Image (cartoon, helix red, strand yellow):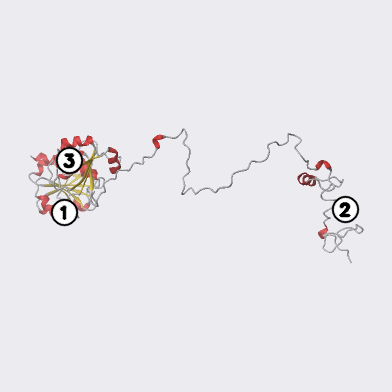
Amino acid sequence: MKPPHSNRHGGAGRPPGSGRPPSAGGRPPAGGGPGGPSRLHAPNGQPNDRQQRRDHAGGQSSGAPAQYARPQGPRPDGPPDQRGPRPQGKPFQSRPNQDNQHRERPRNDFHRPDRQRDHAPRQQLPETPRGAVWLYGLHAVAAALANPSRRLRHLMLTEEAQQTLTQRRPPPWPVPPEHVERGRLDHLLGRDIAHQGVALLADPLGTPSLQQALERTGPLIVLDQVTDPRNVGAILRSAAAFGVATVITQDRNAPEETGSLAKAASGALETIPLLRAVNIARTLIALKAAGIWTVGLDSGGVTLSGPALGDRRVALVLGAEGEGLRRLTRETCDEIAGLRMPGKIDSLNVSAAASVALYELTRRA
């Protein structure tokens, strides 16, 4: 029978005659003794590094040398602490809720007086009724004041604008004016709007019927999906200059009556009827049935000539910029004509093309 292994459970972990029973797992005992050297002391009887740190932190232990004991009293490298007892502090107070209370901060040299808030009551801007429109610009407002068919609500202007408006349209006016600062108009209309110091709140004009428009003399202008309000306003201005009877736009793909359209028209919105048609092709058929010659303006047609048209009453049809006339609109027109442009540019803005075409039509006289 073989003797048991010294590292196995149940075997002899220490040689016979050691005087102490073996520990579990064959490990030596924690303290020094007959069973082997202590873990806290070196084999030569001196304390190891771990025991030195423990003696220095917790005081002198049994069997430790005196040089490792913690010194008592004042530090040898300085005078004793003469600061006295610690003063009594203030009792603890909870921090106030910053959502309900505002802490006052002292004003310093970096305080800017120009940033102080003005607590004076602000002037209330007039409410814009549903469907009403703000007209601005001296020409547009003066023409609206002179139009008896226009329903006016509120007039706001500066002192400088009142002097100029009085020269263009002498009082009395249908509505009393309210004198305001220019900054109030900027806040009402926008800083990028050239309102010239005057704004008029009014209702949109009523739309006449096609039969009522045909009773007026002069040529007609039909706009096929021209959506820019400034272009429509500029065309209205040219139409008023060349004696056009009416301007017809599409009901859906056309701008509404706005302040920018009225300002670009420079007062022509009050004198030239602006009709809205649901279908442009059907409107052209109705104009042809009334004896009007429809001419679509396009660079691919023959050169437009006023004298060649003779005594015909003409309806000038213009398409949107870039796309031009739509296919059905082009096919419905009686004639396709273009402008003579001998230069290097073969196209014009739709409002500029309308002006040149209207001038060509007036050469028949």
Q: How far apart, in angstroms, are the residues tagged by discs 3 and 2?
A: 119 Å
Q: Which callout, 3 or 1, points at the residue further toward the start of the chain?
A: 3
Instruction: Please provide percent x and percent y for residue 22.
Output: 86, 59
Judging from the image, what secondary structure is the residue with disc 1 in? helix
Residue that badge 2 annotates: 33
Judging from the image, what secondary structure is the residue with disc 2 in? loop
Asked whether disc 3 touches disc 1, contact meaning CB atoms under 8 Å apart, the reply is no
Q: Which callout, 3 or 2, points at the residue further toward the start of the chain?
A: 2
Q: How far apart, in angstroms, are the residues tagged by discs 3 and 1?
A: 33 Å
Residue that badge 1 annotates: 283
Judging from the image, what secondary structure is the residue with disc 3 in? helix
Residue type, label 3: Ala
Instruction: Please provide percent x and percent y for residue 287.
Output: 12, 52
Instruction: Please provide percent x and percent y for residue 42.
Output: 84, 47
Which marked residue is nearer to the observer: mark 2 or mark 1?
A: 2
Asked if residue 338 shows in the view, the reply is: no
Residue that badge 3 annotates: 142
Residue occupying the far top of the picture = 109
The residue that appears at 16% across and 55% down in the rendered structure is: 282
Q: Is residue 270 above or below residue 159?
A: below
Residue type, label 1: Thr
> Badge 3, how many Cα within 10 Å: few under 14, some, many 20+?
many
